[in-house]
Amino acid sequence: MLARCPSCRNTFSTDRPGRQDCPICAKPLIVPEPAAAVPAHDAAARAEEPAGTPWERRGELGFWTGWLQTLQQALLEPGKLFASARRDRGASQLGFAVLTTSAFWAIGQIFERLLLGGQREQMRRLVESMSRDRDLGPVLRRMIDVQTQASSPGWVVALVVLTPLFSLVFLYLNAAVTHGVAALLGQARRGFPATFAACAYACAPLALLAVPACGSIVGVLWLIVLTAIGMKITHRISAGGAAASVLAPYLVLCCVLFVAFGAMALALRGALGQP
C-alpha cells in the first residue's frame, strides 16, 4: 500500500499499517488501515438512495422544523418530497402519518363539538322524540339509539383517544390494498416500502380534518391525488399505472357502498312499513 509521510511529504510503499518509521526521513508515523472495498452493487444502491425527507432528518433539523417542512412539501411540492423519501425509514414515515392524522382529527372533533353544539342538541332532542314513537321498527330504533350515543361527550372523548389506533389501521390498510392492486397490475416495481412511503406522506392533507364540515372531504380527495403522485415517483412508474393502482380500490369501495346503502334503504322502508 502507498503511504505519505506527514513530516517530509514523501510517498512510499509499505506492506503493513500501523506505527512505523518513514524510510526517507526516519521520522515516526502511523499508516492508517486501508478502507474496506465496497461491492459495486452496494455502492450503486447507496448512491441510488435519496437523502431523506425533512421528517426523516428531523434529528438534525429539529422535530417541529422537520414536521412542518415535510407537511409543506407534501401539500405544495409533492414531487420533491416523494423523490427524497427513503425506503428504509418505514417507522419514521409511520410516525409522521399517525401524528398528523391523529392530531388534526382530534382537533376537528373538538372544533365540531364546540361550533356545532347547538345543532347537535336540536338533533338529539329530535332523536329522543322519535325514539318514543312505539310504531318504529327495531332497525330504525337501533339506528336512533346509535345516533344518540354518538353525540354524547363520552363518545367524543373516546374517539379522540382512539384516533392514533384508527390512523394506524387506516394507513396499513390503505398501503396494503394499494400495493396489492399495484402488484396485480405489475406496477409495484420497488416493493412494499415504496408504497408505504407514498401512502404515509400522502396523509398530509388530512390536516384538513381540523376544519369542520367540508375539511374531511377535501382532505380525503387530496390524499388520493397525493397517493397517486407518490406511487408514480417512489415506484418510478407511469402516471396511468399509478392512477390505476390508487383509484381501483376506491371504485370497488364505491360499488360496495352503493349496494350497502341500497340494502339499508330497503331495510328502512320495511321498518317504516312502506311498500
Image: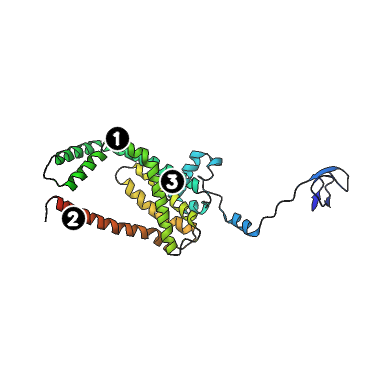
Residue 110 seen in the figure: no
Q: Of 22 and 91, which appears nearest the observer?
A: 91
Residue 25 locus on image (x, y percent): 88, 45
Q: Which residue is mark 2?
A: 266
Q: Secondary structure at mark 1?
A: helix
Give the amino acid type for the residue marked by disc 3 in the picture.
Answer: Ala
Residue 93 relative to residue 118: left or right: right
Q: Of 261 and 5, which appears nearest the observer?
A: 261
Scheme by which the image is coloured = rainbow
- For disc 2, the neighbor class at 10 Å (few under 14, some 14 to 19, many from 20) is some
Residue 114 locus on image (x, y percent): 29, 35
| Quarter of the rendering containing residue 19 | top right
Residue 203 relative to residue 193: left or right: left
Question: Do callouts 2 and 1 mark residues in contact (Cβ within 8 Å)?
Answer: no
Q: How many marks?
A: 3
Residue name at image x 36 percent, y 48 percent: 219
Distance from disc 2 to disc 1, alpha carbons, whole Å, reads 32 Å
Residue name at image x 33 percent, y 46 percent: 215
- For disc 3, the neighbor class at 10 Å (few under 14, some 14 to 19, many from 20) is many
Q: Which residue is mark 1?
A: 154
Please tell me which of labels 2 and 3 falls first in the chain: 3
Question: Do callouts 3 and 1 mark residues in contact (Cβ within 8 Å)?
Answer: no
Give the amino acid type for the residue marked by disc 1 in the picture.
Answer: Gly
Please tell me which of labels 3 and 1 falls first in the chain: 3
Q: Is residue 102 above or below residue 244?
A: above
Distance from disc 2 to disc 3, alpha carbons, whole Å, reads 39 Å
Residue 16 seen in the figure: yes
Please tell me which of labels 2 and 1 falls first in the chain: 1
Give the amino acid type for the residue marked by disc 2 in the picture.
Answer: Leu
Residue name at image x 41 percent, y 57 percent: 178
Q: Which residue is mark 3?
A: 97
> Which label belongs to residue 52?
none
